[in-house]
Image (cartoon, rainbow, N blue to C red):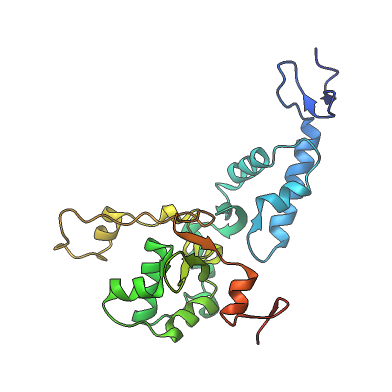
């Protein structure tokens, strides 16, 4: 039997529970949790991870439930609460973006080569530089990859378990945020690409758009990047400090 309204009962381990063993949270605490989550996301310049939000909510509150409720609350407003990988952010409603567009917020202009490389990385990640060049049929300059990494859209994912242990590349949370994707698997599929005129009508009948691995998933032949790897690649000085 549960206690009086608004009271959270706890089991022998101190965890809140209900009559059937389910979580029961005081509506006032849920309301306060929603206000906290809203404030954390609103105050951040970039997406806020769900784990970060969860650490700051009242004990026993389901962060996923709180964020789903907030997302529904903002669904019809001028700003929407959107999920970006494992994080959340407020963004202008898509149908109103034209109202606030300025020269400063226009999409970063990339060269054709950079766009090709970004597209290959997005769809084929994890992918090495040699694999990018094989797909494009031309060499890829280090400068092109540097531009994409400086933009914050491409990152070093890991290292391939093959001779030379080449670095693998993947997209970032900022890439998802900039292009309005919740997850890398939300990238346009075959029909969407054809409809947008981005694929030729002469593509092979058995052509399939690659399905990339998620941001945190590692391929069977891929190891995560470590601090030692970054030092070996010259991206960190010994001790962990970034080279300038």
30 or 200, nearer to the observer: 200
Q: Position of residue 179 (x, y in %)?
A: 47, 64
Of residues 162 and 188, the one drawn nearer to the viewer in this rendering: 162
Seen at 48% across and 81% down, the residue is: 147
Foreground pick, 101 / 188: 188
Residue in the image at 71% along x and 76% along y: 240
- Residue 123 pos. (x, y %): 37, 61
**With respect to residue 84, does 12 lie above or below?**
above
View extreme (front): residue: 163
**Residue 232 place in picture, x, y as percent:** 59, 78
- Eyeballing the image, is 226 above or below 214? below
Q: Quadrant of the C terminus?
A: bottom right
Quadrant where the N terminus sits is: top right
On screen, 162 above or below 42? below
Residue 197 % position (x, y): 24, 65
In the image, is residue 1 above or below residue 16? above
Residue at 45%, 64% (x, y): give it: 161
* Farthest-out residue, top: 1
């Amino acid at each position: 039997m549960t206690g009086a309204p608004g009271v959270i009962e706890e089991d022998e381990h101190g965890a809140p529970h209900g009559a059937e063993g389910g979580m029961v949270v005081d509506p006032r605490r849920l309301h306060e949790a929603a206000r906290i989550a809203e404030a954390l996301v609103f105050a951040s310049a970039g997406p806020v991870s769900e784990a970060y939000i969860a650490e700051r909510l009242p004990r026993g509150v389901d962060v996923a439930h709180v964020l789903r409720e907030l997302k529904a609350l903002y669904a019809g407003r001028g700003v929407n609460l959107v999920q970006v990988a494992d994080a959340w952010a407020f963004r202008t409603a898509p149908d109103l973006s034209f109202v606030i567009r300025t020269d400063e917020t226009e999409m970063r202009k990339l060269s054709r080569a950079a766009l090709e490389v970004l597209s290959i990385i997005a769809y084929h990640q994890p992918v090495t530089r040699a694999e990018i060049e094989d797909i494009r049929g031309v060499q890829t300059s280090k400068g092109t990859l540097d531009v994409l990494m400086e933009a914050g859209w491409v990152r070093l994912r890991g290292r391939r378990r093959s001779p030379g242990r080449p670095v693998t590349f993947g997209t970032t949370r900022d890439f998802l945020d900039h292009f309005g994707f919740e997850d890398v698997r939300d990238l346009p599929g075959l029909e969407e690409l054809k409809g947008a005129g981005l694929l030729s009508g002469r593509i092979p009948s058995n052509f399939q758009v690659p399905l990339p691995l998620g941001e945190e998933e590692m391929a069977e032949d891929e190891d995560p990047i470590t601090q030692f790897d970054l030092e070996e690649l010259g991206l960190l000085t010994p001790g962990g400090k970034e080279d300038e």
